[in-house]
Amino acid sequence: MKTYPQSVGDIVAIGARRAPARVAVRDRAGTERTYAELHERSTRLANGLVGLGLKPGDRVAAWMEDCAEHVEVYFACAKAGLVVCPVNARFTASEAAYILADSEARALLWTPGLEERVASLPDMSGELLLVSPPGSGLGHEYEALVAGGASLELPPPASDSLFILGFTSGTTGKPKGAMLTHRSVLAIARMNARSFRLSGWPVVALTGSMSFVAVVPAHVLCALSLGGTVTIMGKWDPDSLLYVIERDRATFTYVPSPLLPEVTEALSRRRAAWQSLDSVLHSASRASADHLGALYDVVGSRLIEGWGMTEHSGGLATATVPSDYLGATRQSGIFAGVGRAAVDVDIKVVDGQGAELPHDGVSVGELCLSSPALMAGYWRRPDATAAALADGWYRTGDAGTIDPDGYVTVSDRRTDLIVSGGANVYPSEVEICIAAIPEVREVAVVGVPHPRWGQAVVAVVVKRPDGSHLTEDAVIQHCRRELAGYKKPTQVIFMPELPRTTSLKISRVRLREQVVSRLTA
């Protein structure tokens, strides 16, 4: 009998044995799954997927909204040795099609709100197995697959087997899949439990979209591994969040940067509603020290600030602890940093040649980390893997410092990467989209500071000689058709040429300075 998880599917099996009637997940639609129900349904779904001909290692794309079934799919794939490939619920059909093709997905599961986009995917008559919501008429019906699946346990996958293929990207090229194993995901569940300050049997008000790669491994599986209950918020606002916290007596939640001021105001206004909270994580894009300080003024040392990434199985590599905030004011340096290394994480800062720099709080270099939660590499991209992983260290691409006490400050998040409203926007992807417009000769995309979203996406376009009629609105509308809404530029600036370095590469630093100067003039 297993008393601790050796593969991800064991999390729900152990939970069902310990507290079968305890609610594991509930969603905004009112659906609840106890641990016993979640264990049985995910086992039946696992057998149903295997019965369709899927084999261990096959990729299963989950293009799903936030719901209890989303959790079932993860556990079903874990039990069957299948690989979950999350597809962002905000993606267009063309964006999803790229993920399906690059991962060579064998199956696609989706929820009702994505029906129209699924139907418009290219080549739906291929080898892709479709598992649909009720009434769709496309492929195999989800509930029928669960009902018809056997309740027999399948042979568990090895701990180093691939479990999640989470697509992320550098600042050049198309998105690439970070390979997360059962071992790395179980590691981040344990590590995040410490970083989030979760006690046994936590109650989580889940504010993040489950279609973001990090949310299920770093938050949902983390809580369920401790026997917790997760309320999936779906679309929410500060008042609905407070309602759920008070109703469920939630012990943990997290607040994304764009909503920090509104949530802080609501928490301040209704203090009695959230006294059950043990900790409050700020998540996603960098927030201003003033906004974090204001939240601290309300929740005190419950506040957690950290730094994480998809390649770290979606979890935190650093985190603050309550004692960090002793005597803190809004002007304190603590609000500029991201805490110290999380449990089992080692962090160093290196110069351009890879030589380690001193932990003096001044020397800026690239932050590198070593951890049992690191990805195994990038899917079928050996060159990218070799560039990112060496001798057990992951080169994050983030610049920062480490002080003598181990506090980490991130000065630039992958300089070219744009983090807008907590979502990563990769300039190259937007540039490829805009470059397809015939009147565009050249384009570069940068992020500029935004008081609500952290950063806003701005495109700088050089027109072809015959493209004088091209307008800002035409470029934005083109992007709206081809890209998820958060990726489209909020503004388009036309310039006669782009600034370049001595090696004739586009100087994004100078371009960003020019854009900011123009927008603030």
Image: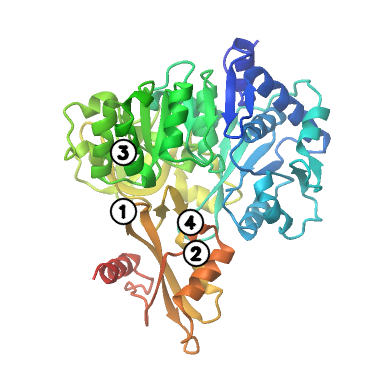
Marks 4/2: CA–CA distance? 11 Å
Mark 4 is surrounded, within 10 Å at the Cα level, by few (under 14), some (14 to 19) or many (20 or more) other residues, namely: some
Sequence-first tag of 3 and 2:
3
Q: Amino acid at mark 4?
A: Tyr
User: Would you name the residue on which mark 1 appears?
Assistant: 451
Quick one: SS at disc 3? helix
Q: Which mark is residue 486?
A: 4
Query: Does the rendering let one see residue 6?
Result: no
The image quadrant where one finds the C terminus is bottom left
Q: Residue at x 68, y 21 (%)?
A: 37
Judged left or right of residue 258, residue 409 is left
Marks 3/4: CA–CA distance? 25 Å
* Image location (x, y in percent) of residue 461: 43, 75
User: Would you name the residue on which mark 2 appears?
Assistant: 430
Q: Amino acid at mark 2?
A: Val
Q: Contact (CB < 8 A) between labels 3 and 4?
A: no
Mark 2 is surrounded, within 10 Å at the Cα level, by few (under 14), some (14 to 19) or many (20 or more) other residues, namely: many
Indicate whether 217 appears above or below 423. above
Sequence-first tag of 1 and 3:
3
* Image location (x, y in percent) of residue 393: 42, 39
Sequence-first tag of 1 and 4:
1
Quick one: SS at disc 4? helix
